[in-house]
């Protein structure tokens, strides 16, 4: 794979720090790192017969499917005089600007300029910004890196390619704060037992956790593609432990997995894509094996139900009230108000081990790209057709099973 030869000049090679994680525009260390990976940009079912304007890593783009069924992602603003192609017409060969009729194909080639003189070759001098798009498992992915003609393989995550069950691609969520505040939260496994205590209908795990408060362990271990976070505490029987395992693949793929014995085999993958420094998108794909007992759609309805206003005091005028009892809004209240990493005051504790490792891995990936290398998490060509399983679950394990998990043999 061609890495595009990107390498920052020595004058710009200052030491990277946490604040660099917040800035993802073109030319920034984090932005260049993100551009080495495939990023989710839409559900396939949401791309209709009209163009869809999106912003990815600070770039304004338009997504469409031409009359031949080819996927295209090109610059939002026409290369002629900047009109938005969101209002363009989709044709057999590409997308045509509404203003003066310039026609672009999915590779950004300008095919027609109807107002130019007959025989004009000016069309051949115009190259419109474009990026490759691939469809997998009901999601659309793009690669914004320098190697557009020879990008790395699109990861074949098991939740996207398995055929022995049902796949449910949930509607995307759009958030208006830094992507990293959300992202480090996914490995902050312990916060759920405080913040989301009132949001869970099944209480046995939470009750067990609080019975053994202070006797829990948090481990963060590197993996081939990222890291895994393991929370464990004394189990219901001697020589057993409650274990919650979550797994991350760089840069922003998160496997949540089943929440109990009845859900083992259920997979939930979250794909986080920054739009700009202060906005991001989350795409969720659930895979439910044929023998899964608990209907995921019913559980999802409960997660997304509006929080109850029954206990809200009349004089409580805080912006996000009511928020208790609804997972996503509880997360939003905390993550959107904490300030950006590298700029906020914080004191990382033992419970933040996975967050510390996640930051370290991302900074290392940024540094690797800055030096012209291939960052962690890129799928090698030799594994292009392999199915990747990001292990995640909540289960009671024997101590010997826990030892194997901690030694990298799950």
Image (cartoon, rainbow, N blue to C red):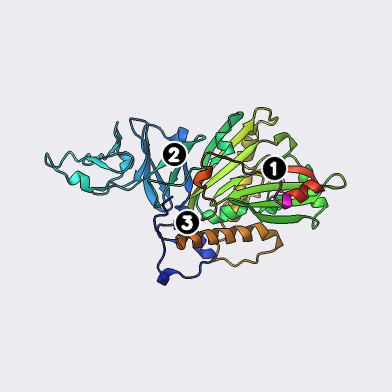
Image x and y of residue 245, in percent: 69, 47
The residue depicted at 74 percent of the width and 37 percent of the height is: 261
Chain-order first, disc 3 or disc 2: 3
Mark nearer the viewer, 2 or 1: 2
Say whether marks 2 and 1 touch (CB < 8 Å). Answer: no
- In the image, residue 73 lies in the stretch drawn in magenta: no
Q: In this view, does 171 lie above or below 147?
A: above
Q: Is residue 15 above or below residue 189?
A: below
Query: Would you say 230 lies left or right of 268 here?
Result: right
* Circle 3: element type: helix
* Circle 1: element type: strand
Mark 3 lies on residue: 33
Q: In this view, does 249 lie above or below 368?
A: above
Chain-order first, disc 2 or disc 1: 2
Magenta stretch, main secondary structure, is loop
Mark 1 lies on residue: 393
The quarter of the picture where residue 46 lies is top left
Q: Start and end of the magenta stretch? A: 405-410
């Amino acid at each position: 794979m061609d890495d595009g030869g990107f390498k920052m000049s020595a004058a710009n090679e200052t030491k990277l720090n946490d604040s660099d994680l917040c800035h993802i525009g073109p030319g920034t260390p984090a932005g260049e790192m993100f551009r080495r990976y495939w990023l989710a940009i839409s559900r396939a079912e949401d791309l209709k017969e009209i163009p869809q304007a999106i912003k990815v890593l600070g770039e304004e783009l338009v997504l469409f499917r031409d009359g031949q069924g080819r996927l295209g992602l090109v610059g939002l603003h026409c290369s002629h005089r900047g009109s938005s192609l969101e209002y363009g017409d989709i044709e057999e060969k590409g997308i045509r600007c509404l203003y003066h009729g310039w026609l672009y194909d999915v590779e950004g080639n300008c095919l027609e300029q109807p107002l130019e003189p007959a025989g004009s070759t000016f069309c051949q001098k115009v190259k419109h910004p474009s990026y490759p798009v691939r469809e997998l498992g009901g999601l659309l992915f793009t690669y914004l890196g320098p190697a557009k003609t020879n990008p790395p393989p699109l990861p074949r995550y098991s939740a996207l390619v398995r055929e022995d069950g049902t796949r449910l691609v949930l509607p995307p969520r759009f958030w208006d704060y830094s992507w990293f505040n959300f992202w480090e939260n996914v490995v902050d496994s312990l916060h759920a037992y405080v913040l989301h205590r009132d949001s869970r209908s099944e209480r046995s795990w939470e009750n067990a956790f609080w019975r053994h408060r202070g006797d829990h362990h948090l481990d963060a271990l590197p993996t081939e593609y990222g890291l895994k976070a393991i929370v464990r505490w004394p189990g219901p029987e001697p020589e057993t432990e409650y274990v919650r395992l979550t797994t991350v693949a760089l840069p922003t793929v998160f496997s949540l997995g089943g929440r109990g014995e009845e859900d083992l085999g259920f997979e939930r993958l979250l794909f986080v894509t920054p739009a700009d420094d202060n906005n991001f998108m989350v795409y969720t794909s659930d895979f439910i094996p044929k023998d899964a007992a608990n209907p995921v759609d019913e559980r999802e309805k409960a997660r997304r139900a509006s929080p109850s206003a029954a206990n809200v005091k009349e004089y409580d005028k805080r912006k996000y009230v009511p928020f208790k009892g609804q997972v996503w809004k509880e997360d939003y209240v905390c993550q959107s108000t904490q300030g950006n990493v590298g700029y906020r005051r914080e004191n990382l504790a033992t419970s933040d081990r996975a967050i510390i490792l996640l930051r370290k891995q991302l900074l290392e990936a940024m540094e690797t790209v800055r030096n012209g290398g291939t960052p962690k998490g890129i799928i090698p060509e030799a594994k292009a057709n392999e199915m990747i399983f990001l292990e995640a679950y909540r289960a009671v394990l024997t101590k010997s099973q826990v030892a194997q998990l901690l030694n990298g043999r799950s």
